[in-house]
Amino acid sequence: HTDVEQVEAANTAFYEAVEQGDFEKVSEFWLTPSDLGVDESYHDPADVGVVSCVHPGWPVLTGRGEVLRSYALIMANTDYIQFFLTDVHISVTGDTALVTCTENILSGGPAPEGDDELGPLVGQLVVATNTYRRTPSGWKLWSHHASPVLAETEGEEGEDTTP
């Protein structure tokens, strides 16, 4: 595999782990200080290889604990989620890779009380940047930043707003 193919495989597997609600697998994709060869007994892990994450509408989360807690919360409150990635672009320089993509997300929350069915499905369009670092055990996420795409409503396109 070339570096780009390996990064693409890691990126796809990360999204699949989120879709499956597999917290352990999601955790494995995030960089740890030991992935960088840092002995955590001598260094504060918060100072080394700090991971970060921005979910749409959330403040920036820093540190592995905060980031993983956010995924645990999302997965606990989402009964169904599926990502259709489009506009994927991958660039690799040395031991760092940058992935930009559009996340076409279909998700459903918990069912209304007393109902066995999923809650209503909602579609969302998000642009994301994922930064990966090469480690001895493969490419790991260093940072994820996702922002919602504001969709135009009917009548906005070409509308003249001058008085």
Image (tube, helix red, strand yellow):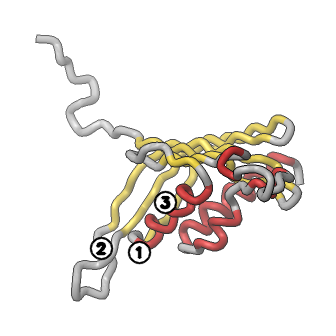
Q: Which residue is mark 3?
A: 70
**Residue 91 sits in which quadrant?**
top right
Crowding near the residue tagged with mark 1, few <14, some 14–19, many ≥20 C-alpha atoms within 10 Å: some
* Residue at 65% in and 61% down: 14
Badge 3 marks a residue whose secondary structure is helix
- How many numbered circles does the render carry? 3
* Residue 112 image offset from top left, x and y in percent: 23, 78
**Pointer 1: what residue?**
79
Asked if residue 78 can be seen in this view, the reply is yes
Q: CA distance from mark 2 to mark 1?
A: 8 Å
Q: Amino acid at mark 3?
A: Ser
Amino acid type shown at disc 2 = Gly
* Quadrant occupied by the N terminus: bottom right
The first of marks 2 and 3 along the sequence is: 3
- Eye-nearest disc, 1 or 3: 3
Given residues 63 and 56, the one toward you in this image is 63
Q: Percent x, y for residue 110?
A: 33, 75
Q: Secondary structure at mark 2?
A: loop
**How many residues crowd mark 2 within 10 Å: few (<14), some (14–19), many (20+)?**
some
Q: Which residue is mark 2?
A: 119
